Amino acid sequence: MTVSHECAARVIPERAFERLQAFMAARRSSNEPCGDMECFERELHEYVVEVEREVLAEELSRVDVDLPAVTIEGEVYRQVVRCEESYTSAAGPVRVMRSLYRRLEGERTLCPLELRAGIVEGRWTPLAARQAAFVVAHLTPQEGEDLFRELGNMTPSKSSLDRLPKQLSGRWEAERERFEATLRAEETVPPEAVTMAVSLDGVMVAMKDGARTQKRRDAQAQGKHTCGPAGYQEVGCGTLSFYDAEGERLSTVRLARMPEKHKATLKDTLSQEIAAVLGQRPDLTLVKLADGARDNWSYLGTALPQGPEIIDFYHACDHLKSAFDAAYGENSSRSKGQFEKYRHLLRDEEEGVEKVIRALAHLRDAHPRKRKVSTELAYFRRYRHRMRYATAQAQNLPTGSGVVEAACKTLATERMKRSGMRWRHTGGQAILTLRALHQSERFERAWKLLSSTYKRTVVIPENVVLFPKRTVH
């Protein structure tokens, strides 16, 4: 029988769960297997997420408030309209009727449904926002859009995936110090830890607002080259790692901040992390480990509690190799032989750095025109007190800053230095924050803190006088 359009409009559609049951019954009654397993999987998935959307819509409707007035944070808001809205859930778009309230004429409206459910940025259900934030922390917005489309659940656009982390970061930064203190208070130092190593480093990232032209002009006016590529600035990375008595690394907290003078925020955060740990475990040995950058040691050497200070062994080796290459020729057999000899002396002998200094002093005298040799000799003399590698090894202390260098790569380079990428401070910090939380195993707890900022208590006043509901056309 053919049903007219008019009659069809009056037919009550099947509920999603009933459609899923009908699909399952049809398959179970069939004597033949499906012809195309991928098509079968897709069809089944579509039925299942349809059920999920329907159940979620029902639950969101329960959260809605349809009354003449409500109280939010001590202020009375009166209902001004009821209308339908679509929200992005982890299963796809969900449409529900909701009420909007306003305190005074001309002010923006509030939606109790969104405040009670914790809808993120007026659009995302909490789980959808969490999943989207996690994905875009690891992939570009375009890759995220492609991934979600392939998965067949929600299908957020590239632009919405680009906006979300910036919006979340704004909320995180507003409460950052409180959130970070809460995360630290919830953590316990590994009981087998005997050493805590703190490291600083940085990586150059292309900036949209990197002041390339002004940077070149300033350099030319001072008669020197720029300190880095024009339009690039340094993202600061810091790590706090715990080691057991055998020198095995147990866990690491990773931090990263967008370019800032002297890495001020990063250093302040590291100091608070260290203070919290030593408040728990004052018996830990604090090792300060970095390359020879002066800014690193102006912080590590003076702003932190006492502890062994160590120049990264591999950076020291780079300087050692440069000296021999300058004297004997880059990668010459004699340079290689001398480098290997003194590299082992530097690492394994108690007075290794003194022997290196004497060897480089002799090399400087033998090659007075090789200015590079003098430069490297000055480097070893300046940092000799931080090159006691044999002593550090005897105590099973770390001597390499590979952990923080890896943090620079995994936090910043892998995500922020793809072809053609340039960043502004806000967007870059959003990505760095999410990635650092994930790599520090703090994302789960951090998300609970962040998502809670989207929830507010809605109180139904007593003695509410009812009035006729408005109808939205």
Image (cartoon, helix red, strand yellow):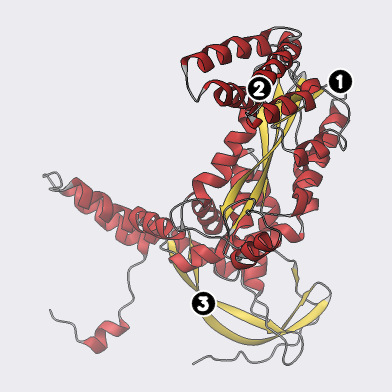
Which three-letter amino acid code belongs to the residue tagged 1?
Asp
- Residue 347 pos. (x, y %): 66, 13
Front: mark 2 or 3 = 2
Query: Relative to 129, is 256 on the left or the right?
Result: right
**Residue 192, percent across and down?**
73, 17
Give the residue pinned by disc 2. 313
Q: Which residue is pictured at 47% across the width and 19% down the height? A: 332
Residue 54: quarter of image: bottom left
> Where is mark 3, residue-wise?
85
Q: Compare marks 2 and 3 and give the one earlier in the sequence.
A: 3
**Quadrant location of residue 154?**
bottom left
The kind of residue tagged 2 is Phe
Q: Is residue 165 left or right of residue 116?
A: left
**Residue that label 1 marks:** 283
Badge 3 amino acid: Glu
Q: Which mark is residue 123?
A: none
Describe the element under mark 1 as helix, strand or loop.
loop
Mark 3 Cα shell of 10 Å, populated few (<14), some (14-19), many (≥20): few
